[in-house]
């Protein structure tokens, strides 16, 4: 199994929308990717509650059966479109993939 964790910080305002609106839109669009490709087992985007100053604004935890399933997800047009939205609003992104 491959675990894929991504964390972002968002600009206070980007694309004419406020930070809260962008976070909620990003979370909802990520939720819409559930079941997108075979081998995607878990997809959980969360906005942390009462974040500390060192917290990220949005976190995605996902699990895939194989590295190929993760690659299929990463290159799927629906995922690419969500990624473009997030890149326009986010200021920082970190990611880790590991086998468990």
Image (spheres, rainbow, N blue to C red):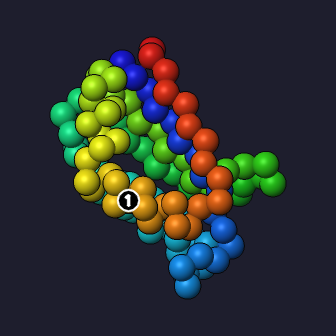
Within the image, what quadrant is residue 16 found in? bottom right
Q: Residue furthest top?
A: 100
Tell me: residue 48, above or below residue 71.
below
**SS label for mark 1:** helix
Residue 72 in picture, x, y percent from top left = 26, 36
Q: Quadrant of the C terminus?
A: top left
Q: Residue furthest right?
A: 53
Tell me: residue 62, above or below residue 97.
below
Report the side of 1 relative to 17 (left or right).
left
Residue lying at 34% horizontally and 42% vertically, measured from the top left = 74
Residue 89 in picture, x, y percent from top left = 56, 67
Tell me: residue 34, above or below residue 11.
above
Residue lying at 36% horizontally and 18% vertically, measured from the top left = 1
- Can the viewer see residue 16 in this picture? yes
Please name whichever residue, 49 or 4, is drawn nearer the observer in this view of the structure.
4
The residue indicated by pointer 1 is 82
Residue lying at 34% horizontally and 60% vertically, measured from the top left = 81
- Can the viewer see residue 40 in this picture? no
Q: Residue furthest left?
A: 38
């Amino acid at each position: 199994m491959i675990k894929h964790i991504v964390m972002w910080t968002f600009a206070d305002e980007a694309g004419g929308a406020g930070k809260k609106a962008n976070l909620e839109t990003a979370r909802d669009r990520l939720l819409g990717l559930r079941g997108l490709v075979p081998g995607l087992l878990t997809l959980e985007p969360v906005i942390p509650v009462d974040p500390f100053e060192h917290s990220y604004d949005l976190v995605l935890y996902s699990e895939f059966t194989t590295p190929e399933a993760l690659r299929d997800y990463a290159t799927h047009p629906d995922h690419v479109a969500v990624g473009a939205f997030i890149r326009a609003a986010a200021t920082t992104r970190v990611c880790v993939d590991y086998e468990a």
